[in-house]
Amino acid sequence: MTTHQRVRGPLSAAVARLCAEVRPRVGQRAATGLGEVLDRLSAPLQLAVVGRIKSGKSTLVNALIGRRVAPTDVGECTKLVTRFQYGTVDRIEVVLLDGNKYSLPFTAEGAIPTDLGVRPERVSHVEAYLTNAVLRDLTVIDTPGLGSLDDDSVARTEAVLGNGGQEGADSERLDPVSHAAVAGAEAVLHVITRSVRADDRQALSTFKAATGSRPSGPVNALGVLNKADAIDPDSVSGGAGEPWTAARALAVEQERQLKPRVAEVLPLIGLLAETSESGEFTSSDAEALHRLAALDGATRETMLISADLFTEWECEVPADTRARLLELLDLHGVRCALEEIDADPHITAGRLRSRLHEASGLSALLSRINSVFRGRADGIKAAAGLASVAAVAQSCADPTERARLHAALEGLLTQPQAHQLRLLEALTMISSGAVTLPPDLLDEVLRLGGSEDFSERLGMPGSPVERLTEFALERAKWWRSFASLGATPAQSRVAHVVHRAYFLIWRQLR
């Protein structure tokens, strides 16, 4: 079975056919680049989790995978890029900068060992193969703290996600800049916290490092406001004195700052998500919480003032048990669990774990990952593939080869079924700042490209088909007029794409 036959999705398959057809008609160097594009098109979606140091990236990675496997304590391993991908057997491969690799076992707890047996300066990255089903269609990449003071960690991340560890590459390989555009991650989760106010410039540099210099935006980037339980409700306008309400309000504010770099910013309590999703929370932990819930109210409130008081205050629950609860849930999680027990004294361990999962915000995040990333993986991978082919064309020294690749790209984009790629291209132009739109039109375009559901794309969830059809035609006409009369040349290019998108929706609804 050839590489392009394994590609899933009609758009990715179309890009793969382009690569396969043009590859025999270009030189060895360009053919090698196209071969790399084919390999990436047939692989699962590459999702990089990025953010500053101590933002909780590895904790989120563990929650996504459903297993506490990524090291979360600041140490040598957290300075390395680790790729978590599906495998039939759990195993670890440490890839060195010289291209050599060796295997390591997981720890007895099923985690990556903190000691890799070699100096970190010699390591390119770590490949972790897991049998977790979630990784069948999504490779999760844990990165060091981008934007931190650790320049070595940043450079290592850019080398793996961008240059692909090309040290010593032969002359038939792509140049580092072109290879970066081919090898970068296809989707990004950008983790921010209350104490680190990410601005547009920082977000852009982070995305650029993760995606190998390909433009990123609302098509393939989500923001995660982590450690929502640590937000002081009184410090956020609209916080209403409640941490989760404050977290939602702050997420909206951060989203406003980061748009159109990201599709959305969602609040999360990463530790609760990791504990509830990874199976670390046991019936013994639930029993300990039941015993704490049975304490008198004054004692409980005193213990919940601080971590020190929670572990050191004298009570019948052993101090080491309370320390474990603190490690699993933190004070906010313990408080949530006790409130659930108060409401239902007979709540089971499984039900309590489910309620903690709900309180973490992970369900909402997973839902958006499914709709923004998994549900649109074909389009995301196809768009990344097209950008990679363009990078290969740009690297061609032979003008004939370059023209041949550009002609193939234009030929693909003129096909009716490729209009989704045109819409992705328009969103990327907007997110990169190449095209600016008034806020109301910007929101409309982002919404149009933000879902597969017609009613959501039209901003009219729950509306009858007749009304959706009528509205799609109205907006198609408006954008056609805007393209002809009221737009700048750059806006006109986007407006024609938006007009066509509305027209196709109208036709499909009919």
Image (cartoon, grey):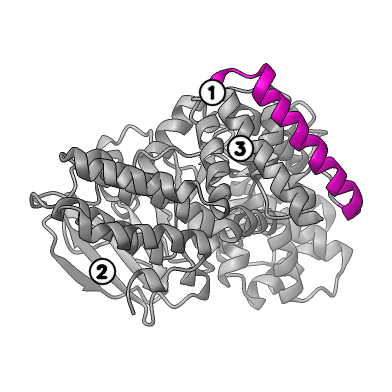
Q: Quadrant of residue 494?
A: top right
Q: Position of residue 13 (x, y in %)?
A: 45, 64
Q: Is residue 283 above or below residue 356?
A: below
Mark 3 highlights which residue? 497
Name which residue lies at 76% across and 72% down: 351
Q: Which of the two discs, 2 and 3, sits closer to the camera?
A: 3
- Give the spatial CA distance, label 1 vs label 3: 11 Å
Q: Secondary structure at mark 3?
A: helix
Q: First in sequence, mark 1 or 3: give its number.
A: 1
Residue 56 image point, x, y percent: 50, 48
Start and end of the magenta stretch?
A: 462-490
* C-alpha separation, residue under disc 1 versus residue under disc 2: 47 Å
Give 308 or 221, whichever is nearer the viewer.
221
* 417 relative to 104 in the view: left or right: right
**In the rendered structure, which amino acid carries the disc numbered 2?**
Glu
Which residue is under mark 2? 93
Residue sitting at 57 percent across and 60 percent down? 374
360 displayed left or right of 40 = right
Q: Residue at the spot x=46%, y=54% of the render?
A: 382
Return the disc, 1 or 2, that comes first in the chain's sequence: 2
Badge 1 amino acid = Ala
Please tell me which residue is depicted at 25% across the width and 58% down the height of the picture. Answer: 23
